[in-house]
Each structure stands twice: as C-alpha cells, then as structure tokens.
C-alpha cells in the first residue's frame, strides 16, 4: 500500500512540475499583439521627431570561419545626431581599431585614429542622406542606422510582416516592452523603455542569410554635447 501511495504522490508531483514548465502566457494586463505595433511606432516617431539625440551602442556579431565555427566580434559606438544635418560617430572595435566619422551637411569625413589617416567624401544633404550614403555607397557598418532616419515610421509600416508582444521585461534598467518582429529578410527583438521616452534599450537582429547581431543601445534625446560635430 505504501508503494502505491508513493507512486501516486510522485505522479501528482510530476504532473504539477510539467504544468509549471509549460508555455508562459502574458498576463491579461499586458498589451496584446495588436497593440505591439503601436508601441513600435511610438518609439519610431519619438526618434524621428527628435531634433537632437545621442546613443551609446555596444554591438556584437557572429562571423563564420573557414572551419564552420562561429566567432564573436564586437564594437563600441557613440553616436550623436543633431538634425537636420549634423552627425558624429566614434567607434572602437574589439581589435582596438578606432575611427571617427563626421557629417557636417556638406561632406563626410572619416578619420582612422589608429593609422592617422583621413578620407573625405562630398555629400550635401540631411542626416537621412548621410546615413544612406554611408551604408549604401561607402559600405560603412552602422548598426541601427535605419533608426537615425526620419523616415523610420513609414519604413517600419512597410517592412513589418509579423509582430508579437513577448512580455513586460523587468530585468532592464527600466521596465521595457519586449517585442518580436519579423520582416522579409530579418527577424529582430526589441526592448522599448516604458514612460516618457519610449526608446530602445536592447535589440537582437537575426539575419537569416548571415547570422545574429546583438545590440545594446542607450538612447537619449537630451544632453547631447554641443560639440556634436566639430570640424576635423
């Protein structure tokens, strides 16, 4: 009899543990998937309408090696934007290489600090134009560069094919809305701060063709230094 009771108790405990480990659903008080797009667009509009902002970006990415192993590399970037036509990017890569990129509305100047080499390219226009030129023409890596353009709300509206509200995340420095987004070529997760400044705190991008890019960014729409974009 004791043996039978022990088996029954173990069965009940196992059933309880399995149910506890089942899928975790969002609480009824959390936004649903239909509201997730509103949260994403609110973030995009906040950035697009900001006249001046800065962001510190700690990014890492996995690169495939000849033997098939994935190896992680990283970089630190401090980016300052003053619309309509000023931007500065300071970058230090994990191998120690340091570069400064400055856009002053008339030209793009790149200074390789490590080798003390300068390069200039004429480019008249706005920060939007400079970002497109840097990434599309000069092939300069600029993680989150799309977020620096005033067209980001419209671009997201076109790009997003599927979006899910994952959870209210309490492990970040402020409470954040965790969203999972799918586009035609890229999947990304984004953690957006709740409150008066709904700005990104973390982004994980998965390129289906090349792999994963993890970005921890700290955006601020105030406090950008007046020396945002000095002449180099």
Image: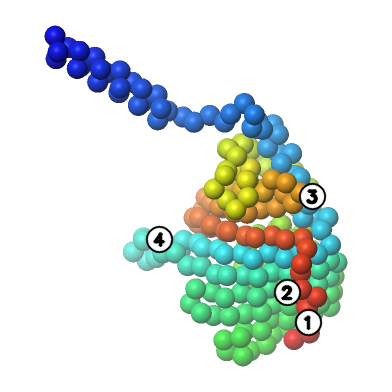
The residue located at (48%, 77%) in the rendering is 95
Decide which of tag 3 and tag 1 comes sooner along the chain. Answer: 3
Is 25 positioned to the left or the right of 67 in the image? right
Q: Position of residue 192 (x, y in %)?
A: 66, 48
In 3D space, how far apart are the residues under numbered discs 4 and 1 (Cα atoms)? 39 Å
Task: Say whether marks 4 and 1 touch (CB < 8 Å).
Answer: no
Mark yes or no: residue 185 visible.
no
**Label ID, residue 230:** 1
Outermost top residue: 1
For discs 3 and 4, the disc positioned in front in the rendered view: 3
Q: Residue 221, located in which quarter of the rendered image?
A: bottom right
In 3D space, how far apart are the residues under numbered discs 2 and 1 (Cα atoms)? 8 Å
Decide which of tag 2 and tag 1 comes sooner along the chain. Answer: 2
Q: Is residue 163 above or below residue 221?
A: above
Outermost front residue: 2
Task: Say whether marks 3 and 1 touch (CB < 8 Å).
Answer: no
In 3D space, how far apart are the residues under numbered discs 2 and 3 (Cα atoms)? 22 Å
In this view of the protein, which residue sits in the foreground, 69 or 92?
A: 92
Residue underneath mark 4:
70
**Label ID, residue 88:** 2
Is 90 positioned to the left or the right of 51 in the image? left
Is 53 positioned to the left or the right of 30 in the image? right
SS at badge 3:
helix
Categorize mark 3 by other alpha carbons within 10 Å: few (<14), some (14-19), many (20+).
some
Decide which of tag 3 and tag 4 comes sooner along the chain. Answer: 3
The residue located at (49%, 31%) in the rendering is 24
Residue underneath mark 3:
45
In 3D space, how far apart are the residues under numbered discs 3 and 4 (Cα atoms)? 36 Å
């Amino acid at each position: 009899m004791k043996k039978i009771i022990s088996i029954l108790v173990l069965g009940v405990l196992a059933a309880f543990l399995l149910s506890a480990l089942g899928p975790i659903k969002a609480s009824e008080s959390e936004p649903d998937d239909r509201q997730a797009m509103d949260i994403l667009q609110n973030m995009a509009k906040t950035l697009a309408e900001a006249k001046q902002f800065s962001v510190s970006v700690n990014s890492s990415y996995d690169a495939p090696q000849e033997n098939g192993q994935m190896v992680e590399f990283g970089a630190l970037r401090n980016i300052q934007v003053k619309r309509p036509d000023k931007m500065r990017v300071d970058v230090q890569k994990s191998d120690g290489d340091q570069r400064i990129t400055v856009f002053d509305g008339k030209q793009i100047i790149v200074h390789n600090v490590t080798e003390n080499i300068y390069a200039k390219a004429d480019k008249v226009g706005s920060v939007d134009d400079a970002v497109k030129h840097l990434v599309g023409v000069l092939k300069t890596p600029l993680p989150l560069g799309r977020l620096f353009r005033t067209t980001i709300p419209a671009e997201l509206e076109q790009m997003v094919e599927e979006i899910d509200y994952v959870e209210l995340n309490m492990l970040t420095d402020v409470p954040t809305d965790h969203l999972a987004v799918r586009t035609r070529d890229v999947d990304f997760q984004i953690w957006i701060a709740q409150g008066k400044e709904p700005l990104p705190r973390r982004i994980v991008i998965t390129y289906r063709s090349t792999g994963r890019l993890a970005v921890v960014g700290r955006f601020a729409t105030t406090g950008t230094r007046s020396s945002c974009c000095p002449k180099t």
